[in-house]
Image: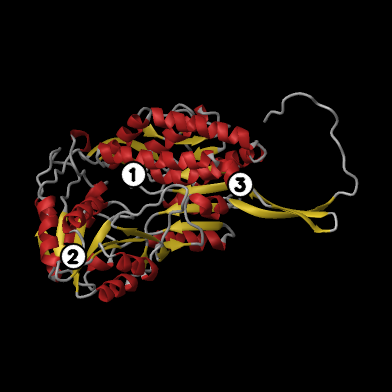
């Protein structure tokens, strides 16, 4: 084994206490280039002991970092923002090499992450408390928000930069130390972010990265030194994270899966709706928790809408994300096989395959993990291609007879992450945003991901916990409130000082 701090050339290790380390487990996982199917390296899979080392490093750093001034914290965040912005192209290439999404999509992911960093740069405003003078005679009361200590972030493969940046900058800005566990499928971007944070002046140990699988996840959930856990992933795992984490006394926000519906009313601009359905259904090969996977056509527009969507899909180029293609491969061979099995199940169940992605001829290595965009018509709510989160480039069209039937269909689904309605009727849109049971709603916007100063999160089986990601909810999650009541009978003065006041 290579010495700690000097990982082997093809080994992707951890980042603990300000340096790269290999860890002690000896377990390894393969990392692939999805566009070629070739193994590009191995990632160290952390043991419980490796996780404990990272938590210990975070614990040591947290004591000093919580006392760092807001001026110091924001200086680090501004410097980190500049580094990420200057190196965004490099980061996008790393994403494409390990996840497979096309470079333009990877660049968009970096941009959305930058927006959260910029929000975190304004943490002094977000942490302001309240003050009430003379609540009783010569008694004042005021409120504070203080950091939790050590927090964990467990992020998925589909957004190896954006999702860590939903959480880490806010947690750090609030004065916490972080242990980040990225997906073992595409781990390199998280390590770059940790190194760039250190370059920006973040003290050693405030941000640590441990790579690993379920063993590392459970170790973080069980460790008594971890005060809170943020998670994004599938609903079954989100439920496990929430149950195990809260049983261990931790604060948990676990964002789960989705089945996002896009409702198209008869008065909608069908060309706009078709463009939106293709963009939202097949961007990032459908590997988005906010992807549109259920297109709900309110009759009599279904035939015309399906024809428009199919025509646009015929112009999409599937292939290597570094070749200017529109859609890249799936992240792993196993995931590609899983999604392909859903396509086969849809055919067997009687859905009409208008466009069959199994027939795709990719612009890329034949050994890549390919499946082309797929469109099913006449999907019914009992089919697995509707009931399950496929997490791939599969779009199903469900036909309904009315607005009320569309809302009933959406609200009956166990997921409640995001939804969209396309219409030119303002009254219908306003009614939909009020009646639909989902955490994020788009009106003529297919992927209603909120800006960083609002919060991201769904309802029902799409979220376990009370607080959403970033925005005001993110600040509330990573802090706890304290109220102080004070009486000072004799005012004191600090003496004369004619110097200009400065922040330290």
User: Residue at image x 43%, y 57%?
Assistant: 457
State the SS at label 3.
loop
The disc at residue 127 is 3
Residue 272 drawn at (x, y percent): 20, 54
Residue at the far right: name it.
Answer: 490
Upstream in sequence: badge 1 or badge 3: 3
Upstream in sequence: badge 2 or badge 1: 1
Gap in Å between the C-alphas at discs 2 and 1? 31 Å
Identify whether 429 is placed above or below 98.
Answer: below
Nearest the camera: 90 or 429? 429
User: Residue at image x 50%, y 29%?
Assistant: 79
Quadrant of image for the N terminus: top left
Look at the numbered discs 2 and 3 and tell me whether their residues touch, using CB distance below 8 Å. no
User: Residue at image x 43%, y 54%?
Assistant: 456
Nearest the camera: 226 or 100? 100
Gap in Å between the C-alphas at discs 1 and 3? 36 Å
State the SS at label 2.
strand
User: Residue at image x 55%, y 61%?
Assistant: 246
Gap in Å between the C-alphas at discs 2 and 3? 45 Å
Residue 442 drawn at (x, y percent): 33, 58
What is the image's colouring? secondary structure
Does residue 335 appear anywhere in the picture? yes
Instruction: Check disc 2: other Cα within 10 Å, few if <14, some if 14-19, many if 20+.
Output: many
Identify whether 103 is placed above or below 471.
Answer: above
Does residue 27 appear anywhere in the picture? no
**Residue marked by disc 1:** 185
**Residue marked by disc 2:** 397
Q: In the drawing, does residue 359 fall left or right of residue 141?
A: left
Residue at the far top: name it.
Answer: 499
The quarter of the displayed image where residue 58 is located: top right
Residue 81 drawn at (x, y percent): 46, 33
């Amino acid at each position: 084994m290579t010495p700690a701090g000097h990982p082997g050339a093809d080994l992707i290790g951890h980042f603990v206490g300000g340096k790269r380390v290999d860890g002690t487990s000896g377990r390894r996982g393969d990392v692939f280039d999805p566009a070629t199917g070739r193994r590009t390296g191995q990632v160290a899979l952390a043991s419980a002991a490796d996780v404990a080392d990272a938590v210990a490093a975070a614990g040591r750093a947290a004591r000093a970092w919580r006392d760092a001034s807001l001026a110091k914290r924001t200086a680090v965040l501004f410097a980190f923002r500049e580094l990420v912005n200057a190196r965004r192209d490099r980061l996008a290439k790393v994403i494409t090499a390990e996840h497979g999404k096309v470079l333009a999509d990877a660049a968009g992911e970096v941009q959305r992450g930058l927006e959260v960093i910029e929000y975190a740069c304004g943490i002094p405003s977000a942490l302001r408390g309240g003050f009430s003078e003379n609540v009783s005679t010569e008694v004042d009361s005021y409120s504070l928000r203080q950091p939790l200590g050590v927090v964990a972030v467990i992020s998925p493969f589909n957004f190896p930069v954006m999702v860590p940046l939903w959480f880490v900058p806010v947690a750090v800005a609030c004065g916490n130390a972080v242990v980040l566990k990225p997906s073992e499928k595409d781990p390199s971007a998280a390590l770059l972010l940790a190194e760039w944070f250190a370059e920006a002046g973040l003290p050693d140990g405030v941000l640590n990265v441990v790579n690993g699988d379920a063993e590392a996840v459970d170790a973080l959930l069980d460790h008594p030194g971890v005060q809170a856990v943020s998670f994004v992933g599938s609903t079954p795992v989100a439920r496990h994270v929430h149950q195990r984490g809260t049983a261990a006394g931790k604060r948990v926000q676990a964002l789960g899966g989705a089945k996002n519906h896009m409702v198209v009313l008869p008065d909608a601009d069908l060309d706009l709706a078709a463009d939106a359905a293709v963009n939202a259904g097949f961007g990032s090969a459908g590997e988005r928790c906010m992807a549109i996977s259920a297109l709900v056509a309110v009759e009599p527009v279904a035939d015309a809408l399906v024809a428009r969507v199919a025509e646009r899909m015929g112009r999409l180029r599937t292939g290597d994300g570094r070749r200017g293609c529109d859609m890249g491969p799936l992240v792993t061979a196993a995931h590609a096989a899983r999604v392909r099995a859903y396509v086969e199940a849809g055919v067997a169940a009687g859905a009409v395959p208008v466009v069959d992605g199994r027939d795709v001829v990719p612009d890329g290595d034949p050994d890549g993990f390919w499946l082309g965009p797929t469109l099913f018509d006449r999907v019914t709510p009992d089919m697995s291609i509707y009931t399950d989160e496929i997490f791939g480039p599969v779009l199903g069209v469900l036909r309904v007879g009315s607005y009320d039937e569309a809302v009933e269909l959406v609200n009956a689904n166990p997921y409640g992450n995001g939804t969209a309605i396309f219409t030119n009727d303002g009254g219908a849109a306003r009614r939909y945003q009020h009646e639909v049971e989902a955490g994020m709603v788009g009106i003529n916007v297919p992927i209603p991901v909120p800006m960083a100063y609002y919060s991201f999160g769904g309802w029902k089986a799409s979220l376990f916990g009370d607080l959403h990601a970033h925005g005001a909810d993110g600040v509330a999650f990573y802090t706890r409130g304290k109220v102080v009541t004070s009486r000072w009978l004799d005012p004191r003065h600090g003496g004369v000082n004619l110097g200009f006041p400065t922040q330290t």
